[in-house]
Amino acid sequence: MKSIDKKILVTGATGKVGQAFINAFLNDPNQKGTIRALCHRRHLLPNARLEVVQGSISDQETIQKAMKDVTHVVHLATPKEDPKTIIDVAIKGLFWLLESCRKSDSFKRFIVIGGDASVGHYFYPYKDPITEQQAHAAYPGCYALSKVLEETMLQQYFVQYDLDGTCLRASWIMEGDDLKRHLHFGTQVFGVPEWHKIVKPQTAVEYEKENIVPLMLDVNGSPLKRNMVHLNDLVAAICLSLDHLEAKQQTFNISMEEPFDYGKAANYLLKTRKIKSVPIQTEYYSTWLDINKANFLLGWRPVYGLEQMIEEAWEY
């Protein structure tokens, strides 16, 4: 795709990925154009190249206003685990956006940030690395279902209208001290599992006091391998996908080169920081998200691996 001055509509603009992408785009001298952020309740700091449209993604008139003269859409809005908003965001919102895109004279590309929740994350056993051809398999809950619905709707617009779009199927997104907050037994744990609910309450208190980290075991009793990606690497993939010819109508897995291995993490923390670990048995499965397609077609490779992720989290 020929590089042009872009007018990018960003949904979910005030979230972790939205703010990081907007900052990266506006601070990159090679990126020409402006950002239009669709914000529902929260706000963004002003910038000469940033315009804000307030309103709900499920409202057609709001979307029509937000889509005026837009060349690219980066769709980040997500309902999380909220049954009350899943239809408004994952179906109505995405539908109005795609409808506006297919009727627009200025539109060039639609980018959806999906997730490995659409293939079941670590809930289901996979004997081989998970490629982009893997059939959808949402785990229980509405968030995973929303990721399947997003990918499916985008794919159908490829088929029905030859829409130019890309799905970046991201794994669990980490930044700052997220990983450190994940690997502790306190009640303010980041993400799941919530370790303090797996062990006895007093045991969790003792582990937290002694700075012991959990060593997550899979259903077979081996250290679990889980897919993660650093926020900076995901933002790099988004920026690369805006104009890349090979990104048209493609889905790409976006993750670390290798899954995050809780066993290797425990060994590294013991070696570098004298931090001990305790094994925690779970009923989850180790998985490996194959990112070769993104490397082959886009030339994208993540910068962050396990050690870099740990170092950033503990030095944050």
Image: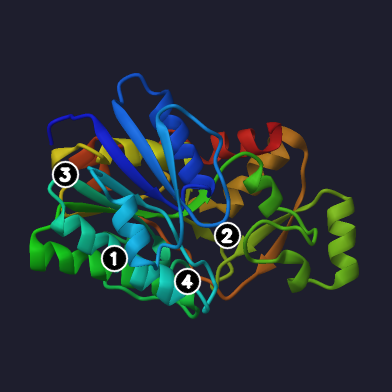
Ranked by sequence position, the earlier of labels 1 and 4 is 1
Q: Amino acid at mark 1?
A: Trp
Q: Amino acid at mark 4?
A: Tyr
Colouring scheme, one of rainbow, by chain, secondary structure, one colour:
rainbow
Image quarter (top left, top right, bottom left or bottom right) of the C terminus: top right
Tell whether 132 sits left or right of 9: left
Q: Position of residue 111 (x, y in %)?
A: 29, 51
Depth check, front residue: 94 or 256: 94
Ranked by sequence position, the earlier of labels 1 and 2 is 1
Can you identify the residue that label 3 sits on? 106
Can you identify the residue that label 1 sits on? 96
Q: Amino acid at mark 2?
A: Pro
Can you identify the residue that label 4 sits on? 143
> Image point 22% across, 59% down: which residue?
100
> Image point 26% across, 41% down: which residue?
241
Mark 4 residue element: helix
Task: Check contact, mark 4 vs mark 2: CB within 8 A.
Answer: no
Image quarter (top left, top right, bottom left or bottom right) of the N terminus: top left
Ranked by sequence position, the earlier of labels 3 and 1 is 1
Can you identify the residue that label 2 sits on? 223
Mark 1 residue element: helix
**How many other residues sit within 10 Å of disc 1, few (<14), some (14-19) or many (≥20)?**
some
Q: Is residue 157 above or below residue 13?
A: below
Q: Is residue 254 above or below residue 97?
A: above
How far is disc 2 from disc 3 in space, using C-alphas? 50 Å
Q: Position of residue 107 (x, y in %)?
A: 18, 47
Comparing labels 3 and 4, the label whose residue is closer to the camera: 3
Comparing labels 2 and 3, the label whose residue is closer to the camera: 3
Ranked by sequence position, the earlier of labels 2 and 3 is 3
How far is disc 3 from disc 1 in space, using C-alphas? 16 Å
**How many other residues sit within 10 Å of disc 3, few (<14), some (14-19) or many (≥20)?**
some
Q: Position of residue 53 (x, y in %)?
A: 43, 49
